[in-house]
Image (cartoon, grey):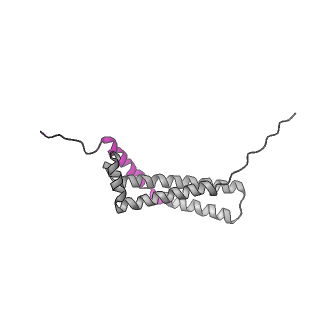
Amino acid sequence: MAFFRPSVSREAEVRYHADQEVGKGFPELLEKARAAETDLRRAQADLASVQELRAAGLAFDRALTEALRAAEANQRATFGVKSYDDRIRRRKGKATPRGAEWTAEVNRLRTLREQNRLTGIPRVPRPVVTAAR
C-alpha cells in the first residue's frame, strides 16, 4: 500500500508564482532606488532646505523598500517551491550559491534602508501653535 503525500501545497505554489512575478521587476526597482539616492546626495551637496532633504530622503526610503520587497521575493523564489512549507528547505536554499547571493543582496538593501532611516531623513520640527487670548 502506497501513501501519497503531496510534495507541495497549493498555497506554496501560488506564493511561489507570485514571488516570481514580483521579483521580475527587481532591476527596474533597483535602478529607481539608485536614481533616488543620486537625487538625495545631490540635494545634500547643494545644501538644500530641510524640507527638500526630507522629501528626497523619504523618496529614497520608498524606492529602497520597493526594491527590498522584490529582492526578498526573488530570494524566496530562488530557494524553491518546497521552501515555502519547510524551514529546512529554506536553510538549505540559503546555502546554495544563488541563495547566498540573494541573501547578501537582501541584507545589503536592509542595511542601506536602515542607515537612510537613521541618518538620511532629517526631522522637521512641528510648527508651534500659540493660543490667542
Q: Left or right: where does residue 49 sit relative to residue 36?
A: right
In this picture, which residue range is highlighted in magenta?
A: 1-28
Q: Is residue 10 above or below residue 117?
A: above
The percent coordinates of residue 12 (x first, y second) are 33, 44
The percent coordinates of residue 36 (x first, y second) are 58, 59
The one nearer the camera, 110 or 44, is: 110
Q: How many marks?
A: 0
Q: Residue furthest bottom?
A: 45
Q: Left or right: where does residue 3 sit relative to residue 128?
A: left
The percent coordinates of residue 9 (x first, y second) are 30, 42
The percent coordinates of residue 100 (x first, y second) are 39, 60
94 drawn magenta? no
The one nearer the camera, 118 or 40, is: 118
Q: Is residue 10 above or below residue 108?
A: above
Q: Main secondary structure of the magenta part?
A: helix
Quarter of the picture holding the N terminus: top left
Quarter of the picture holding the C terminus: top right
The residue depicted at 17 percent of the width and 40 percent of the height is 3
The residue depicted at 85 percent of the width and 35 percent of the height is 132
Q: Residue furthest right?
A: 133
Q: Left or right: where does residue 45 sit relative to residue 13?
A: right
14 drawn magenta? yes
The residue depicted at 45 percent of the width and 53 percent of the height is 70
